[in-house]
Structures are given as C-alpha cells and as structure tokens.
Image (tube, rainbow, N blue to C red):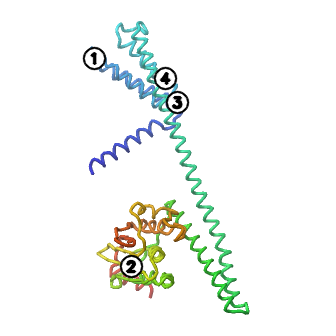
Amino acid sequence: MDARASFRERTATNRKLLGLILRERSLAHRLAITAAVVAGSVIVTYSLDRAYPEGHLYSVNLASSIIAAAFGGLVPGLLASLAEALVVDYFFVEPRGFILDSFPSVLRVVLYVSFGWLTCYLVAHLREALRSSNSERDLSLELARSRETMLALVSHDLRGPLSAIAMAAKMLSRLVPEQEKATKYSQYVTNAVDQMSFLIDDLLDASRIEQGTFTLKPEASDLGRLIDQAIRSVEKDAAKKDVTLVRRTGAEDEPPRVFDFHRLLQLLTNLLSNAIKFSPASGTVTLEVRCEGELVTFRVRDEGPGIRPGDREKVFTKFYQGDHHTHPGTGLGLFISKGIVSAHGGSIRIEDSDSGAVFSLELRLRPVSPLEQEEAAHAFQ
C-alpha cells in the first residue's frame, strides 16, 4: 500500500512539473525565466570553481541550459544555451578571458546549442500534443453536452404527444360503440405509450450516469414497503410465464433507513424483470434480503441459462445484450442499475452459481434513529 501511495505521489509530482514546463507564457516571461536560470547557474558555477578549481564542474551549465530551453522555448532557449557556453568559455576555461580560442571551445558551444535546440524541439512537440489533447477533450465534452441537451429537449418534446396519445386512447375506449374492441385497442396504445415513456426515462438516466450528473433524493424509507412494491410491479410479467416469485427477507421488522426509495425500486424492478425474462416457464425467481447493521444485501436469483464468466462485466455496460435475438431489449437496464448502486455508494456483482444467475448488491443504508422517527412523525401531524 505504501509503494502504491509513493507511486501516486511521484506521478502527481511529475504531472505538476510537466504542466509547469508546458504552460503557455509570453515571450517576455520566457526571456525573464531563461535569464534567471543562466544567472543562477553562473553564480553556482563560480562558487564551485572557487571551492574546487580542478573540478571542471561545467555540467551544471549544461543542465541549466537544458532547463532554460525547456522553460524558455526556441528563441530564449537557444540564446540561453549560447550564453551558457560563452560564459563558461570566457570565465572558467583556460586561458580565461578568451572566447572560441580552441577547437574544444567551439565544440562546447555547438554541444550546448545542440542540446538546447533538441530540448526546445521536444518541448514544442509535447506542447502541441497537449494542446491537441485538450482541444479533443473540449470537443468531446462539448459534443457530450450537446447530446445531453438534445436528448433532454427531444424527450421533453416527446412527452407532450405521448400524453395526448394516451388521453385520446382513453377517450376512444369510451366513445366507440363496440366497447370491448375499443378497450382492447386502447390498451394496446396505452401499453405502447408506457413503453416509450420508460425508454425515454432510461435514455435520460443513462445519459446522466454517463455524464456524472445522476443524483439521488435520499429520505427515510421502509425496506418492507420497497420490497412489496418491487414484487407487485413484476407480478403480471411473472404470471404470464407462470414464474413463481419467492421472497426471503426479514426486512419487515427493520427500522426505516435512508435511501432513494424510487431509485432502489427502479433497481429491484430491473433485476426482477430481467430474472423473469430469462427464467424458463414455470421457473422460480427468488429475492433475498439480509440486513447486518448498516449493510443491506439484496440477491436476485433465477433459474435461467446463467451468465458466462467472461460476460459478467459486459452485462453492466451501456447497450450490451448477450442474447438479443431470444430476449430483446435496450441494453440499458443493468447499466442504469449499476449507476443507481454506485450513486448509493454500494456494489453490484454476479455470483457464481450452479444454475441460473445470481445478482448480488450490497448497500450501506443508515438506519433512522428513534429520535429522527419521532421528529418525522411530528412533522407529518
């Protein structure tokens, strides 16, 4: 753990240093930085030369010319590298007081300037790559915001016609003389409207989860009532396939807990609906709930074909469908379910099972204290 923390600290430091080097600066600012670096290196070299005259510690100047080139850019960097070479040649190389008086002196100038130019070249390319990356990121964020805005607008515009269609279907069932047929076809229209409304809600939820704007409305809620409503919401689908719903829970005796009731209801309904969809006729779907302090564990078990180990992470991705020919759907249910669990600070996974699939989710739901219950009771009176 210490090694990982140390690695993260080093990575963060390197990122800060790279960001400092690649920051956009004016020409005057860059010239000031390179002048300060050159002046500092000359002072350090002079001090070292006085203390160790036989040391030839000119690598300080080479390093400082590279630093000046990194921070200063092409023109200031090359000027700094040239200045470093000439200062070393004039003040610290025998015979002192002369410039470019020998081949090593000329070679030193070429070496310093070459290193400075190479550093400027690399930094310029890094800066361009960073600028391109930032531009692509900004474009991606803008496209994501535009997509979310368009989705919100389209969803809002669709709800109006859908409401009108649903209302017209109800009116037709009352006005058409053949009441039985009218009611039948009105129900078809109503079911189609409901399906479109659910699809719009799922698309909006998926977009919010993807953009990190998905929010909860936690309040003191009863686990028993949550489970009752989740079971009731899928009873019709279970009856159509003759699937038995089994409930194993002692949550009825639990005190109220703080969570988003409607989101957890949506989550359990998604998991139970999936379990029914993939269960064979006359199969069994089991909902288990266990409470241990703040930890609440839900398990939804079916008797279907199960999920291959290699697909267990994929099923939680957006639009993924393992068997879309036999069991069609949008592929958003489990993606949204994972988003709801994550928003509650919990986890969801698929457990190993000999038959069928077992979805297990763990949530830490704080029980409401007796004092909070009493205050809530007074507030409703």
Element type where label 4 sits in the image: helix
Marks 3, 2: nearer the viewer: 2
Whichever of labels 4 and 1 marks the residue nearer the N terminus, that label is 1
Residue at mark 2: 287
Whichever of labels 1 and 2 marks the residue nearer the N terminus, that label is 1
Element type where label 2 sits in the image: strand
Residue at mark 1: 55
| C-alpha gap between disc 4 and disc 2 | 72 Å
**Residue 20 percent location from the top left of the image:** 44, 38
Marks 3, 1: nearer the viewer: 1
Instruction: Report the disc number at residue 78.
Output: 4
Residue at the spot x=48%, y=23% of the render?
Answer: 78
Whichever of labels 3 and 1 marks the residue nearer the N terminus, that label is 3
**Residue 268 percent location from the top left of the image:** 44, 75
| C-alpha gap between disc 3 and disc 1 | 35 Å
**Residue 370 percent location from the top left of the image:** 33, 82
Instruction: Report the disc number at residue 28.
Output: 3
Q: Amino acid at mark 3?
A: Ala
Quadrant in the picture for residue 294 = bottom left
Marks 4, 2: nearer the viewer: 2
Residue at the spot x=58%, y=53% of the render?
Answer: 142
**Residue 73 percent location from the top left of the image:** 50, 29
Image quadrant containing the C terminus: bottom left
Marks 1, 2: nearer the viewer: 2
Marks 3, 4: nearer the viewer: 4
When the figure is inspected, residue 223 is found, relative to residue 295, above or below; the finding is below
Please tell me which residue lies in front, 106 or 281. Answer: 281
Mark 3 nearby-residue class (10 Å; few <14, some 14–19, many ≥20):
few
Q: Amino acid at mark 2?
A: Leu
| C-alpha gap between disc 4 and disc 1 | 26 Å
